[in-house]
DNA sequence: TATTTTTTTAACAAAATCTTAATGAATTTA
DNA sequence: TAAATTCATTAAGATTTTGTTAAAAAAATA
């Protein structure tokens, strides 16, 4: 028996969940349901759905934040459902990583079609979930970094830098690319304090910070996180 | 200079084209316009746009057929614009390969956001941006150069020179062409230190730097990177 | 508010790169 | 063949970039 794609429906309204379950199952999908943001995030981590339908207006957390949190470590397609909303909301959700945005009431046929679009556009991502190089292990879902099995602490900026480098392992990232990623395009790209952060990361993850094995300098260009088997 | 993504707008209405051109250009896109389906298909083939905005209701051909035809040979993202339409039309267009569907009148912000979604979902072609000759392999996206699978280091100028030569493999490049590319047109074209860099490259990529196989001298003219199978 | 943590700035040391110049080898020209 | 031109090679000083430290400023936490 061929198992269809697994859909995670995150919605607190029973009506909608029931309706989606019926329609989706009759189209060969397998359904998982979450009734809160927290549960939704947990199920995403544990069940690895193929696609997520996220209703806005959950009781426990703003949909925008849910998406942001998900996108920190996974890029499963997300289709956002919402009663109605301003253009700004739509835009910010799409930019936060939503694949599509559908306004209620919607036609089931359209939702199904847009799900098919999202599923066929899946970007294969090698660095999903867990990253490993040498003795360093990063678990994006739990925002945890371990060296020799021992957990390390990172400030938000340090972690953002490490994550960006890890997501682009073996790729040379220019100073500007890194600064844009961390501080946004408005900030004057002054590499001077990028160096400070690089040093701080090296002090935490390298055996000998002045002779790095993992976080390498590419002189005149930027930095690169190397993959060590 | 960074060139923005190239957008092909296929629309017969001057008003819409003008509006899109203004907005998109102000957001850094480069615009190509087609006023008919036929022209749109031709321009897609000749100009290789990064994304296509296809208005339905073209005079010469049904939008659905245009999309079908495009999808036979290319998978550039297509966003469909349309005045209004039935759910079935939407669904059949999405299933025919459209990445998104927007109903007129639409908010420019939303169109831009959905374009960003479509552009970030593009699956990068792994073999694109990779150059190979003999045992030498250059990955432009990663800025990595490997010889026998071992990564080599290059200074910014060395890399710029190697990249320029590789991008123009088998072509004889004059001293002036190379110097213009690397140091800009203001610099007095003195070939003397181009030689220094050529030597440095040879030392890194050639088996026997004094009898180069790859980076060849064309006496009296310039240099050439040869392709070895 | 006081304390701690994190971010940002600034200054100097260290390292890498760029540029120049000088010399010998190879090639072309007279 | 000798002279002239072009090319290869080396090395060293100048310049730019990066590493490192420490302290001030800002933000978060108690």
Image (tube, coloured by chain):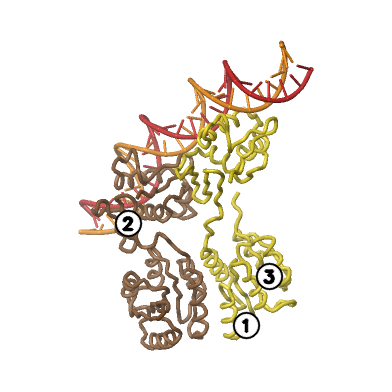
Chain colours: A brown, B yellow, C red, D orange
> Circle 2 sits in a helix, a strand or a loop, which is it?
strand
- Badge 2: residue crowd in 10 Å (few <14, some 14–19, many ≥20): many
As drawn, B124 above or below B169: below
> Chain letter of disc 3?
B
Q: Residue at x 63, y 68 (%)?
A: B73
Spatial separation of the CA atoms under disc 1 and disc 2: 48 Å
The chain identifier of the residue carrying mark 2 reads: A
Where residue A76 sits in the image (x, y, percent)? 42, 69
Report which residue position mark 1 lands on: B84
Marks 2 and 3, Cα distance to the nearest angstrom? 46 Å
Q: Is residue A113 above or below residue D13?
A: below
* Label 3 element class: strand
Q: Do the residues marked 3 and 1 share a common chain?
A: yes
Q: Residues within 10 Å of mark 3 (few under 14, many from 20)?
A: many
Residue at numbered disc 2: A138
Labelled pair 2, 3 in contact (Cβ < 8 Å)? no
Is A98 above or below relative to A202?
Answer: below
Residue sitting nearer the eye, B212 or B22:
B212
Tell me which chain the residue with mark 1 is part of: B
Q: Are marks 3 and 1 in contact (CB under 8 Å)?
A: no
Name the spot of residue A45 as percent of width and height, x first: 33, 69
Disc number lying in front (2 or 3): 2
Q: Is residue A127 left or right of residue B32?
A: left
Residue B76, quarter of picture:
bottom right
């Amino acid at each position: 028996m061929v198992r269809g794609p697994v859909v995670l429906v995150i919605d607190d309204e029973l009506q909608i969940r029931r309706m989606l379950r019926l329609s989706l199952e009759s189209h060969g999908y397998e359904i998982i349901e979450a009734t809160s943001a927290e549960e939704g995030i947990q199920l995403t981590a544990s069940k690895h759905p193929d696609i997520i339908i996220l209703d806005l207006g959950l009781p426990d957390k703003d949909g925008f934040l849910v998406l942001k949190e998900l996108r920190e470590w996974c890029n499963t397609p997300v289709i956002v459902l919402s009663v109605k909303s301003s253009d700004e909301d739509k835009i910010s959700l799409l930019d936060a990583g939503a694949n599509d945005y559908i306004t209620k009431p919607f036609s089931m046929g359209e939702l199904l079609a847009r799900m098919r679009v999202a599923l066929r556009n899946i970007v294969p991502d090698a660095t999903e979930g867990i990253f490993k190089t040498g003795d360093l292990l990063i678990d994006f879902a739990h925002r945890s970094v371990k060296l020799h099995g021992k957990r390390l602490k990172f400030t938000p900026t340090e972690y953002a830098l490490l994550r960006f480098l890890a997501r682009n392992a073996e790729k040379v990232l220019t100073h500007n690319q890194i600064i844009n990623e961390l501080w946004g395009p408005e900030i004057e790209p002054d590499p001077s304090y990028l160096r400070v952060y690089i040093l701080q990361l090296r002090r935490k993850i390298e055996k000998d910070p002045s002779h790095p094995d993992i976080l390498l300098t590419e002189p005149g260009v930027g930095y690169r996180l190397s993959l060590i088997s």
